[in-house]
Image (spheres, rainbow, N blue to C red):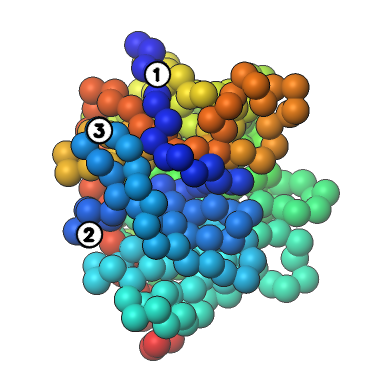
C-alpha cells in the first residue's frame, strides 16, 4: 500500500523531530533540534496542525516527553531538564560530559515510564555513541557502540524493544522486561540503506513499525519480522520521525527537516521542514507518561 501524506503546518522547521501525542491535554509536542525549541500544537480533525506555545533553550533540543501532570522532560544537548507546569526548569540528570563532542538525540518513554535517550557525534569519532536509560538508580548505559542513536519504540505488550542506528541503516530488536527494564541480546532486524537511512520510529497497535527515512522522502511500514507492508510518500526529502495522534490515535504525524536539502533538489521537495499528516488505516499506542525517578532532584 502507498499513502500520500499532506502538509499539516504552514510553518517550517530547520530540523523538526520527536513528535509526541499528549492525549490528556489533547496536544501535539515536537522539537526543532537546531532552533533549540520545543513546540506545542493542536491537531484539527481535518489533519491540520495549529502551532501554539513554544519553549526555547540555550542549545540543541533532541527530544521531549510528558509527565502525568503535563510537565515536560527535555533532552538538551548534554542534560535532561524538567520544565514544570509553572515554567520552572530543573536539571534532572547530566548524560554527556562537557569534553565529549556529542549531543543528545532521539528519546522515548518505556512502558513503565522510564526515559531512554541516545546520542550522536559532532566530530569524526565513529561507533562510540550511547543509548542510556534514566531510572531510579540513575543513568544506565544500554549501548555504547552506536554510530548515531535514533528512533526508539516498543511492541504493544512492551516485551520487545526496537532501536535505530542511523549511520549503518540498522533497525535492531531485543527482548525487554517492561517491569524491571531488563534487556535481552540485541540483534539486527532489518537494514535500510542506499535510498535513505532510518531515523525516527513508532509502533502501532498491531505491532507494526513505522519508520521515517531520512533522505528517502517516505515513511515505511514494516511488520515485526521486518517485511515491508506499506509506504507513506512525503513531499519532504528528509522525513525525521513519526507518531500516531488524535482522539482515536489514527492520524500519523510526520516531522521533517528543511535543513540539509541539496539546492538542486529543493524544487522537488517544496514542503521540506513542515509537519505532515495521513490516515493509514492503523491505530497507534497510547504514550506512557514519564515518571520522575527517585534519583531526580526535587524542583
Mark 1 to mark 3 CA distance (whole Å)? 15 Å
Local SS, label 3: loop
User: In front: mark 2 or mark 3?
Assistant: 3
Q: How many marks?
A: 3
Q: Choose the circle earlier in sequence order: 1 or 3.
A: 1
| Residue farthest along the right direction in this orientation | 124
Mark 2 to mark 3 CA distance (whole Å)? 19 Å
Residue drawn at x 35%, y 11% is 1
Q: Is residue 290 left or right of residue 211?
A: left
Q: Choose the circle earlier in sequence order: 1 or 2.
A: 1
Residue 271 drawn at (x, y percent): 53, 30
- Between 89 and 293, which is closer to the camera in this rendering? 89
User: In front: mark 1 or mark 3?
Assistant: 3
Residue drawn at x 43%, y 86% is 297
Residue 249 drawn at (x, y percent): 22, 39
Local SS, label 2: helix
Residue 201 drawn at (x, y percent): 44, 38
Amino acid at each position: 500500500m502507498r499513502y500520500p501524506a499532506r502538509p499539516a503546518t504552514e510553518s517550517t522547521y530547520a530540523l523538526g523531530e520527536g513528535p509526541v501525542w499528549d492525549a490528556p491535554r489533547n496536544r501535539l509536542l515536537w522539537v526543532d533540534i537546531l532552533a533549540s525549541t520545543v513546540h506545542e500544537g493542536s491537531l484539527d480533525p481535518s489533519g491540520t496542525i495549529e502551532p501554539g506555545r513554544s519553549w526555547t533553550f540555550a542549545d540543541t533540543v533532541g527530544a521531549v516527553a510528558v509527565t502525568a501532570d503535563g510537565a515536560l522532560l527535555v533532552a538538551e544537548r548534554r542534560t535532561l531538564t524538567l520544565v514544570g507546569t509553572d515554567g520552572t526548569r530543573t536539571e534532572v540528570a547530566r548524560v554527556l560530559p562537557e569534553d565529549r563532542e556529542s549531543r543528545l538525540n532521539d528519546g522515548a518513554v518505556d512502558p513503565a515510564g522510564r526515559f531512554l535517550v541516545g546520542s550522536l557525534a559532532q566530530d569524526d569519532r565513529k561507533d562510540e555513541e550511547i543509548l542510556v536509560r534514566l531510572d531510579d538508580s540513575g543513568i544506565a548505559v544500554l549501548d555504547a557502540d552506536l554510530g548515531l542513536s535514533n528512533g526508539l519504540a516498543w511492541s504493544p505488550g512492551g516485551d520487545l524493544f526496537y532501536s535505530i542506528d542511523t549511520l549503518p541503516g540498522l533497525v535492531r530488536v531485543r527482548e525487554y522486561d517492561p517491569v524491571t527494564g531488563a534487556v535481552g541480546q540485541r540483534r539486527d532486524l532489518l537494514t535500510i540503506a542506499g535510498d535513505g537511512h532510518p531515523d525516527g520510529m513508532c509502533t502501532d497497535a498491531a505491532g507494526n513499525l513505522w519508520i521515517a527515512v531520512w533522505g528517502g522522502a517516505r515513511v515505511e511500514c514494516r511488520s515485526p519480522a521486518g517485511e515491508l507492508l506499506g509506504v507513506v510518500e512525503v513531499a519532504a526529502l528528509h522525513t525525521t520521525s513519526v507518531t500516531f495522534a488524535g482522539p482515536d490515535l489514527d492520524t500519523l504525524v510526520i516531522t521533517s527537516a528543511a535543513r540539509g536539502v541539496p539546492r538542486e533538489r529543493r524544487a522537488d521537495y517544496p514542503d521540506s521542514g513542515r509537519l505532515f499528516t495521513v490516515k493509514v488505516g492503523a491505530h497507534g499506542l497510547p504514550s506512557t507518561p514519564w515518571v520522575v525517578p527517585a534519583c531526580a532532584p526535587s524542583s
